[in-house]
Amino acid sequence: MKFGGTLLIVENIEKAKKFYQDILQQTVTMDLGEHAAFENGLSLQANYEGIVGQPLKKLQRANNFQLYFEVVDIEECEQRFKENPQVTFLHNLKAYPWKQRSIRIYDVDKNIIEIAESMDSVIKNCLKQGLTVAETAEITMYPAEYVMGFV
């Protein structure tokens, strides 16, 4: 069995598509009206009850999963989101013990979206700040062999 991607059930396909295109800078590869697929493997589907043939209980802000995106410049991303009234933050920029920083927002259907610095960027920054390969590996929890690839 092969995993084929993630499908989000959305209330309004046009609003959801606009959010993912304009705010999260995702590119649509297929638009079938009530279904849109993005180049990253994510898909959006409206009228899901019609597909499965039965009513479904709808939960908003279930907070039981998140989508994860990576960026190189997290501060620029956070600033861009702060300037957009369509973006609702779960939390602003937050740093973790492994030196990665992230923000979390909600999409238009109240699904959690995490946007974080790529771990490759985190590793590069640790080394740039003078940490050794061993120190960087310990802090980031990445194997020293992987960290060595950035030296």
Image (spheres, rainbow, N blue to C red):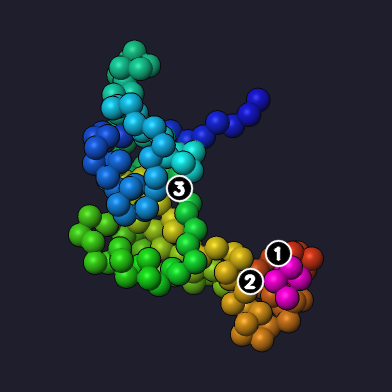
Give the farthest residue toward the bottom: 130
Which residues lie in the magenta part? 147-151
Residue matched to label 2 = 123
List x then y, in percent, for residue 60: 30, 40
Gap in angstroms between the C-alphas marked 1 and 2: 9 Å
List x then y, in percent, for residue 128: 62, 82
Residue matched to label 3 = 67
* Mark before the other along the chain sequence, 2 or 3: 3
User: How packed is label 1: few (under 14 Cα within 10 Å), some, or many (20 or more)?
Assistant: some
Give the farthest residue toward the left: 85
Question: Closer to the camera: disc 1 or disc 2?
Answer: 2
Q: Is residue 138 visible?
A: no
* Mark before the other along the chain sequence, 1 or 2: 2
Q: Could you tell me which residue is drawn at 30 percent across and 52 percent down?
A: 22
Identify the mark at residue 142; answer none if there is no mark: 1
Look at label 1 and name its amino acid: Tyr
User: How packed is label 2: few (under 14 Cα within 10 Å), some, or many (20 or more)?
Assistant: many
Look at label 3 and name its amino acid: Leu
List x then y, in percent, for residue 124: 62, 74
